[in-house]
Amino acid sequence: MDREESRRLTFRLPDLRKKELRTKLTASEQQELDKARAVMAETYPNRTSEQYADKVRLMAIRNFTIKDTTRKESIFQKLFKQENSKEYRLHFLNEDEDVAAYTFPFTFGLEIRQLMEDVGLGLDWPKMLPVDDGMSYTDPLEEDDKEWFEAFPDPAWCAAKLDEVKSLEEKAADQSEEMVKAIRWIKTHWENGYKIYADIDPWEDDDLD
């Protein structure tokens, strides 16, 4: 494999992982993912895992507004006609009550996705759970980040989709107690008006030494 192909696969890996958490990959995408994992394993032989991400963090957020925090255009920007990029932040009424998190291994996230497919939500699950990597709700947001948060599905609709599944908890219990716990957490937070997204934690720099 030449260097250019290795670089391409390395850059493709995050997008493939994000898609994999929401829906099954096509045969060609799976082949790409397998090659990309092999490249990463060869590049970082000290890693014990070939995963791009070891963990998934579900973030549940509600009662927030998106505020424009763009800095005032500087004289330098005016003189040289440089663009003053827009910047936004999420603002919560009560962050202690309006933000919650649930973390589990990436492989368990794939088991949740498979359960959703098995119970008939394979087409809806990608719409129900937005996925990104390194997306912290506390970070400044660019325009596309702002639009991503604004496009989150209605929590009531998400909860209703789970309610449509007969014996969901029993089917989750057939998997494991951890699966029951995760499904209850997701359903309870949707029922209480939280919007949920999945943040895939990429490898930290220290992990790549």
Image: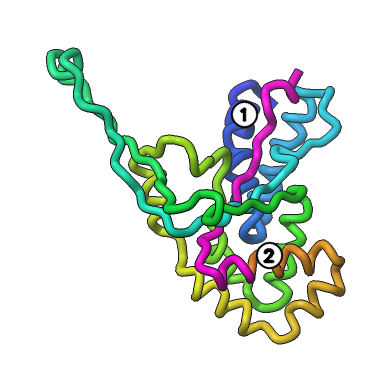
Residue depicted at 85% across the width and 66% down the height:
177
Q: Amino acid at mark 1?
A: Glu
Residue under label 2, please give it. Answer: 185
Residue 204, percent from left and from top: 68, 28
Q: Is residue 118 left or right of residue 83?
A: right
Residue 98 in view here: yes
The residue range painted magenta reads 188-209
| Label pair 1/2, CB-CB below 8 angstroms | no
Residue 35 in view here: no
Residue depicted at 65% across the width and 27% down the height:
6
Q: Is residue 175 above or below residue 144?
A: below
Residue depicted at 70% across the width and 86% down the height:
166
Q: Is residue 181 left or right of residue 71?
A: right
Residue 209, percent from left and from top: 76, 17
* Between 46 and 185, the one nearer to me in the picture: 185
Residue 143, percent from left and from top: 33, 42
In the image, which is nearer the foreground, mark 1 or mark 2? 2
Helix, strand or loop at mark 2: helix
Residue under label 1, please give it. Answer: 5
